[in-house]
Structure formats: structure tokens, C-alpha cells
Image: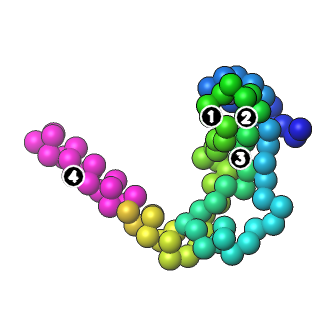
Amino acid sequence: MESDGTTCELCGSVAEVREHRQITAKQLNKAFYYSRWYYCNNPKCSRNVFMKKEHEVWNQNEAAAQVKMFEQSRDQAAHIRNIALEI
Ligand SMILES: [Zn+2]
């Protein structure tokens, strides 16, 4: 079992590291993929797989552009709401 010392956020067991053996079109067609993720081996744990934001790899494609645009407009909406509250 491979590990980088990361523990499961739910049960505290040391989690197993998983990585793509190869990056294929499946990953590249998505907005982003995870270069690494974690697998909790504890059979009693309900959270078997989890990821970290730092392992997000963003693609330069249409899907990524759309997600980023959506996040930007969400930020703008929050900003406009904040201004409205200040007034
Ligand atoms: Zn766990």
C-alpha cells in the first residue's frame, strides 16, 4: 500500500494513494481531473475515496472555460450582493 501520510478525514486511517497510470482523453475532456486521490481501506468507513483541491489539474478546454466562467459569475453575484448589503 502506497501512502503519503494523508489520513482519512472521517476515520483517521492512513489512506492509500491512487494516481492515474496514464492521462487519457477521458481526463483531458473534463474541466479538470485529480492527479492524485486517496482511498480509505477501513471497511467500516463510509468515505472510501476522497480528493484534495491541491491535486486538481485544470485543462485548457471548453469545459474548463465554462466552469471558470460560472465560478466568476458566481463571485460577481456574491460581490453585488455584498455591495447591496453595505448600502
Ligand atoms: Zn476512512
Highlighted range, magenta: 71-87
To which residue does mark 1 refer?
47
To which residue does mark 3 refer?
37
Q: Tell me which amino acid carries mark 3.
A: Trp
Q: Which mark is residue 12?
A: none
Residue 82 visible in the snapshot: yes
Q: Is residue 66 left or right of residue 61?
A: left
Q: Residue at x 76, y 68 (%)?
A: 23
**Mark 2 secondary-structure assignment:** loop
To which residue does mark 2 refer?
40
Q: Mark 3 or 4, which is nearer the eye?
A: 3
Q: Mark 3 or 2, which is nearer the eye?
A: 2
| Front in this rendered view, residue 18 or 79 | 18
Q: Tell me which amino acid carries mark 1.
A: Arg
Say whether marks 1 and 2 touch (CB < 8 Å). yes
Instruction: In the rendered view, tell whether residue 70 sits above or below residue 55.
Output: below
Q: Tell me which amino acid carries mark 2.
A: Cys
Instruction: In the rendered view, tell whether residue 83 sits above or below residue 41.
Output: below
Using a 10 Å C-alpha cutoff, classify the residue at mark 3 as few (fewer than 14 neighbours), some (14 to 19) or many (20 or more). some
To which residue does mark 4 refer?
80
